[in-house]
Amino acid sequence: MKKYRTHLLARLGLLILLLTGSAVFAADDFQTLIGRWQRPDGGYVMEIRSIAPDGKMLGGYFNPRPINVSQAQASLQKGYIKVEVELRDTGYPGSRYTLIYDQPNDRLIGWYYHAVSGQNFEVVFVRQK
């Protein structure tokens, strides 16, 4: 039930963010993403160490061992910060996160594409303190 609730909250939160259009970011705001982010539904951790002005991100992904990140990019999408991370490793042949930064709740919400199964899953990442 907890897993279903997390996914429902992610879906509702993302829908509200995209419909209200209340956030307005600039490329300078990418730096707010730097830190460690964890999915509450498991031990998955995304670490963002730095972000270039063009949005290219450097960091890592852990489950709990390191998984190779082939590319990571922040961009502006309809006034929101969008994060895209592609994984290329054993068991992760092109799996991909597509996330939006939810500033009021300081979290990343969106979808995880699991390349092995071809399925999309709604996900939430919260900042580790």
Image (cartoon, rainbow, N blue to C red):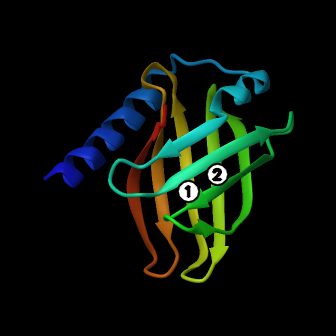
Q: Is 63 on the left-hand or right-hand side of 6?
A: right
Percent coordinates x, y for residue 23 in the rendering: 56, 19
Q: Residue at x 43, y 80 (%)?
A: 117
Percent coordinates x, y for residue 58 in the rendering: 77, 49
Q: Residue at x 51, y 23 (%)?
A: 103
Residue type marked 2: Glu
Percent coordinates x, y for residue 50 in the rendering: 77, 39
Residue type marked 1: Tyr
| Residue receiving disc 1 | 97
User: Relative to residue 4, is residue 92 depicted above or below?
Assistant: below
Q: Residue at x 41, y 49 (%)?
A: 39
Q: Are marks 2 and 1 in contact (CB under 8 Å)?
A: yes
Label 1: element kind: strand
Percent coordinates x, y for residue 116 in the rendering: 49, 82
Query: Can I make out residue 78 in this image?
Result: no
Q: 59 and 78: which one is in front?
A: 59
The residue carrying pointer 2 sits among few (fewer than 14), some (14 to 19) or many (20 or more) residues within 10 Å by Cα, namely some
Q: Residue furthest left?
A: 1
Query: Can I make out residue 16 in this image?
Result: yes
Q: 34 and 121: which one is in front?
A: 34
Disc 2 to disc 1, how far (Cα)?
6 Å
Q: Is 25 on the left-hand or right-hand side of 41?
A: right
User: Relative to residue 105, is residue 112 depicted above or below?
Assistant: below
| Residue receiving disc 2 | 84
Label 2: element kind: strand
**Which of the marked residues, 2 or 1, is nearer the chain's N terminus?**
2
Return the mark for residue 54.
Answer: none
Determine the image quadrant of residue 90: bottom right
Determine the image quadrant of residue 95: bottom right
